[in-house]
Image (cartoon, rainbow, N blue to C red):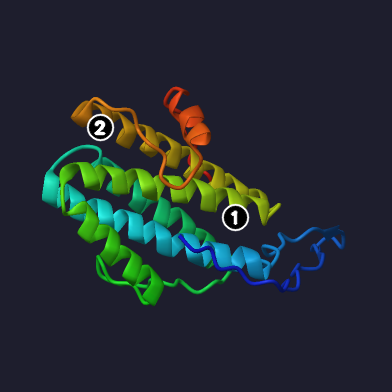
Amino acid sequence: MTHRLAAALAVALALPLAASAAGRELPVMALPVAPTADEAADLAYLRGTGKLARDLFLRFSEAWGREPFATVAIAGLNDMDAVLRLLRRYRVADPVPGTPVGEFPDVELQALFTTLLQRGLGGELEALKVGGLVEEADITDLAISMAHTMKADLRAVYGNLACGSRNHLRAFAREIRALTGQAYVAQSMSQAAVDAILAQPWERCGRGW
């Protein structure tokens, strides 16, 4: 998946101190520091790709009725909500406001969704492989987004989303092995990186901010 990022930085915002009734200066809770252009672009991008993943897994669940599609689709909705809260906190426009399942204002995401959907509807194994590909891409994108920020709330959510994606990748790899008897083959990450994830036990992911 293409990760399109801008370069400029936004100006930080803060509230001044306010005087109390007793005449003492007390700190007033500051507004969140404005996101950089990279941070804002990352949030919008992750919201869109989160919807793409959720919508694909909903369609595959309907078509094949196999785990882990339904479970991962529900998790995808929670992930979208987590990113939406950050978009609202930092006053970044939602790139997919109220769009129906399978529809995307971004033409590249729309084309990618269509391509992956057609592939996954071609067979149960292909759908599972698409699931693995989506999770690999998410893990990579989240690592890039994590490197773009030092904000604690963004890093907490990105870390939680990456944890979930690693678990989802393990789930798809497990189902592929159950269906074929074969080990999962990496599709966008290196095989060594994927194998390192699959070798680790299921993770307990936090809820982020």
Q: Residue furthest right?
A: 24
Tell which circle, 1 or 2, labels the residue nearer the N-terminal end. 1
Residue 3 drawn at (x, y percent): 53, 63
Badge 1 vs badge 2, beta-carbon distance below 8 Å: no
- Which residue sits at x=22%, y=52%? 120
Residue 151 drawn at (x, y percent): 68, 53
For label 1, the residue is 145
Q: Identity of the amino acid at label 2? A: Glu
Pick the residue in front: 195 or 202. Answer: 195
Near mark 2 (Cα within 10 A), the count class, few <14, some 14-19 or many ≥20, is: many
- Which residue sits at x=37%, y=38%? 168
**Relative to 157, is 184 on the left or the right?**
left
SS of the residue at dot 2? helix
User: In the picture, which quadrant includes the N terminus?
Assistant: bottom left
For label 2, the residue is 175
Near mark 1 (Cα within 10 A), the count class, few <14, some 14-19 or many ≥20, is: many
- Which residue sits at x=53%, y=49%? 140
Residue 27 drawn at (x, y percent): 79, 58
Q: Is residue 65 above or below residue 57?
A: above
Residue 130 drawn at (x, y percent): 30, 49
Q: Identity of the amino acid at label 1? A: Ser
